Amino acid sequence: MTTAERRREILDILSGTKTPVAARDLAARFGVSRQVIVQDLAVIRASHTNIISTYRGYVMQQTETGCVREFKVRHLPDQAGEELNLIVDRGGRVKNISISHRVYGRITAELDISCRQDVQEFLQALKGASSTVLSAATDGYHYHLVEAAAPERLDRIGEALGEKGFLAPLQPWEKES
C-alpha cells in the first residue's frame, strides 16, 4: 500500500465514524508505527481542517448547530467532572477548553465531550497520565466553548454554572461590545 492510499483510507475511516480513532489503532491496522500515522494525519489535516485531535484520538468534527457560547468558569481541579457533567446533562457539548495565560497567551485544547461517558473517559485519561487540568496553570480560571441545539439550552447551562458558583466574572476587555 502506498502512502497516498493509506492516507485515503485513514480519511475514509474518519469519515465513517463519529467516535475518535486512536493513532495506535490506525498504526496496528496499517502495520506502521504510530509516528507514521501522526505524520499522515498532519498532512491530511492540512487540507481537511474539520479533523481534530482529542485526548481519545482523531475525529472528524461534526457540523455545528450554530448555537455556541463561551463560558468563563473557575473551580478547583477536583470539580472538573462535576462541571462537565453539569454541561452535558443540560444538552451541551464541550468543544474545547482555553486558558488565558499572562505569558503564553491563549492556549486551547479540543475536548469534544457530549455525555457522561465522555466525562468519565476524560477524567480517566487525566488520572492515567498523572496529569492535571489545564486550568491549574491559571488558578482555576478557564473558558469552555459549548455547543447546544438551541440558545435556551445554553441559557440553562449558564444559569446552572452560575448557581453552582462556577461562572467567573468577565473582565472589561472580555465583555462583548
Image (cartoon, rainbow, N blue to C red):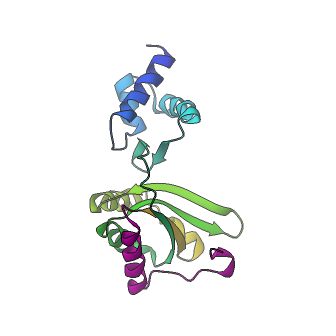
Q: In which quarter of the image is residue 47?
A: top right
Q: Where is residue 19 in the image (x, y as percent from the top left)?
A: 33, 44
Front-most of residues 175 and 89: 175
Q: Residue at x 42, y 47 (%)?
A: 63
Counting labels gives 0
Q: Is residue 109 above or below residue 45?
A: below
Q: In this view, does 37 lie above or below 123?
A: above
Q: Where is residue 157 in the image (x, y as percent from the top left)?
A: 38, 74
Q: Per the image, is 132 magenta?
A: no
Q: In which quarter of the image is residue 99?
A: bottom right
Q: Where is residue 74 in the image (x, y as percent from the top left)?
A: 50, 78
Q: Which residue is drawn at 45% across and 74% down?
A: 77
Q: Which residue is drawn at 52% across and 76% down?
A: 140
Residue located farthest toward the top when viewing the structure as drawn: 1
* Range of residues picked out in magenta: 148-177
Q: Residue at x 42, y 28 (%)?
A: 10
In the rendered image, which quarter contains the N terminus?
top left
In the rendered image, which quarter contains the C terminus?
bottom right
Q: Position of residue 24 (x, y in %)?
A: 40, 36
Q: Quadrant of residue 149?
A: bottom left
Q: In this view, does 36 lie above or below 105?
A: above
